[in-house]
Image (cartoon, grey):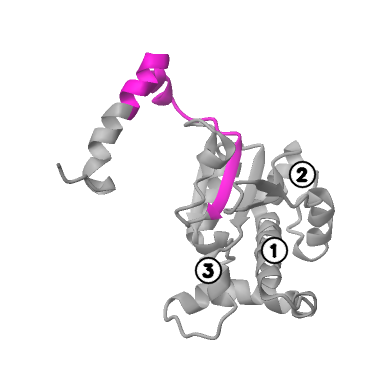
Amino acid sequence: MAEQKSLYESAFDNNKKWIAEKKSTNKDFFKHLAEGQTPEILYIGCSDSRATAEDLMGAAPGQVFVHRNIANIVGGADLNTLSVIQYAVGHLKVKHVVVCGHYYCGGVKAAMEAHDLGILNPWLRYIRDVYRIHQKELDAIIDQEQRYRRLVELNVQEQCINVIKTAVLQKTFLQTGSPVVHGWVFDVRTGELIDLKIDFEKELKHIREIYDLGFEA
């Protein structure tokens, strides 16, 4: 019996099958794909291999501009994430920005534990800051798993607020009425996407009381 190839070894064969499948339903698929992109959504998610953006939403190539990192962080000094937001909002003119976390996130779990993780320490500090801001609520949750799940949700909420703080988001929304920022959580045990129903305009108004950059509608 032939030894089964690893995913890495099968990658190029799988690519050929994918090309054939796309062409079988639309012979001009790649011609149109090469003409450019007009994504509707900027998706900021976790790097976790279980939480792939397009699969969760049933999106096709060209519909979602994707950025992923550990625990879906939007750090104020992270030029990678900030550059993605600048390009997606300022140039691609996306209509929605989604920050999507997921339950059972390894990054959030690590931030809840007392371990020295070297270069990961400053990254996880973003999540620990979220815990500090919401410590009263989180400490009142006795069940450890429920506290863990709630921290995932609060982390998404705070990263949405960090998106709203950016100049390009404030300026573009005040001038055009979009994009709107949303917070989602993916439940890896059920496959369900959960909308945290963040009141974007309320949060924007509150944020601008402190983080106002002088932009007017």
Q: Nearer the viewer, mark 1 or mark 3?
A: 3
| Residue 35: in magenta span | yes
- The span picked out in magenta is 18-45
Question: What SS does tag 2 mark?
Answer: helix
Q: In front: 137, or 168?
A: 137
Nearer-N-terminus badge (3/2):
3
Compute the Cα span from label 3 to label 2: 34 Å
Residue 82 image point, x, y percent? 55, 56
| Residue at image coords 66%, 37% | 95
| Residue type, numbered disc 3 | Gly
The residue carrying mark 2 is: 174
Residue 48 image point, x, y percent? 48, 57
| Residue type, numbered disc 2 | Leu
The reply to whether callout 2 and callout 1 are in contact (CB within 8 Å) is no
Q: Is residue 12 left or right of residue 66?
A: left
Residue 7 image point, x, y percent? 28, 46
Compute the Cα span from label 1 to label 3: 15 Å
Residue farthest left in this picture: 2
Whether 179 is drawn above or below 19: the answer is below
* Residue 158: numbered disc: 1
* Pointer 3 local density, CA inside 10 Å: few below 14, some 14–19, many at least 20: many
| Residue at image coords 27%, 41% | 11
Whether 83 is drawn above or below 133: the answer is above
Q: Quadrant of the N terminus?
A: top left
* Residue 107: numbered disc: 3
